[in-house]
Amino acid sequence: MKTILITGASRGIGREIAKLFAKNGYNVAINYNKSINDAKSLYNEIVSINANAILLKADVKNPNEVKQMVEDTIACFGHIDVLVNNAGISYKGLIFDESDEQTQEIINVNLLGSIYTSKYVIPSMLKNGSGKIINISSIWGNVGASLESTYSASKAGLIGLTKSLAKEYGYNNICVNCICPGVIDTDMNKNLSKAELDETIKQIPAGKIGKTNDISNLVLFLAESTGDYITGQIITVDGGFTL
Ligand code: NAP
């Protein structure tokens, strides 16, 4: 049985990925940081369909906690076949209004967190002779977002990480890809007013914002044998927003 480790699986996109992989017969390692009740309800949902899961509290910006999370997953399931670097936070505002602590937090969670998980998971994939890593970046990492400069920089970093790891481990049968979602209906966008949302939708050729399963379905495609010859790719899922 294959094992997937998803960072930030308690809510939003990560939660949807966890549910889809459980339905598809994977052991699911659910990482959360603050939302313990959401993580527990996800765990219960997964075991209720007779799939295997483990709950792992870890702050991805802390390398010791990441190392422990990876060790606990391997102790429980034996190996990690798929890693999804999904945990992320955002901040909207002028760059000089952002505190130094906020700046560091965004880079540490969104970029360093994914570097740490990759660093600690890859040895297990090398031992296995295969692996899939999927980084959840953002359209803003590709095209840049006014009022989200640090966030965009952290997400652009994930694109560099994806391409580099794909080159470094391609020969070892480890595929590394990156998904750039557009506007997806999760808590991350809950502060958008109706007017802001309507204005955004007007700019999206598909005429709607995305759903979490628009992302999870692609993660599954990349993780399964359908994605075996795809590596180093930056795939946008945004209803045409950034065309
Ligand atoms: P969300 O609903 O706010 O969920 C964020 C998840 O990240 C939560 O499960 C949260 O866990 C976790 N997380 C945050 N900080 C963490 C930390 N330090 N350590 C471990 N986990 C942490 O957001 P989402 O929309 O699902 O976003 C998921 C990913 O997609 C993010 O990387 C985001 O940047 C990216 N994305 C989202 C959109 C969008 O429109 N929604 C667009 C482009 C890209 P806890 O609550 O347990 O702390």
Image (cartoon, rainbow, N blue to C red):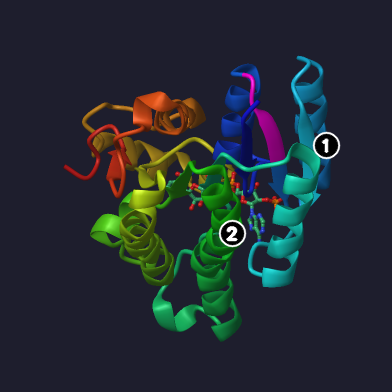
Q: Name which residue lies at 78% across and 16% down.
A: 50
Residue 32, percent from left and from top: 72, 49
- Quadrant of the drawing holding the N terminus: top right
Single out the residue that lies furthest toward the top. Answer: 49
Q: Is residue 33 visible?
A: no
Say what secondary structure mark 2 lies in: helix
Q: Name which residue lies at 45% across and 25% down.
A: 217
Q: Name which residue lies at 38% across and 66% down.
A: 157
Examine the rendered structure and indicate whether residue 82 appears above or below residue 119.
Answer: above
Label 2 Cα crowd, 10 Å radius (few <14 / some 14-19 / many 20+): many
Q: Quadrant of residue 22?
A: top right
Q: Which mark is residue 82?
A: none
- Quadrant of the drawing holding the C terminus: top left
Q: Is residue 11 visible?
A: yes
Q: Which residues are magenta?
A: 25-29
Task: State whether the magenta stretch is mostly helix, strand or loop.
Answer: strand
Instruction: Report the Cα–Cα distance between label 2 and label 1.
Output: 22 Å
Label 1 Cα crowd, 10 Å radius (few <14 / some 14-19 / many 20+): some
- Which amino acid, mark 2? Thr
Q: Which mark is residue 40?
A: 1
Say what secondary structure mark 1 lies in: helix
Q: Quadrant of residue 95?
A: bottom left
Report the residue marked by disc 2. 117
Q: In this figure, what is the number of numbered marks?
A: 2
Residue 202, percent from left and from top: 26, 35
- Which amino acid, mark 1? Lys
Examine the rendered structure and indicate whether residue 120 appears above or below residue 195.
Answer: below
Q: Nearer the viewer, residue 53 or 199?
A: 53
Residue 17, percent from left and from top: 57, 32
User: Does label 2 or label 1 sit earlier along the sequence?
Assistant: 1
Task: Find out whether the residues at labels 2 and 1 contact each other: C-beta distance under 8 Å.
Answer: no
Q: Nearer the viewer, residue 70 or 96?
A: 70
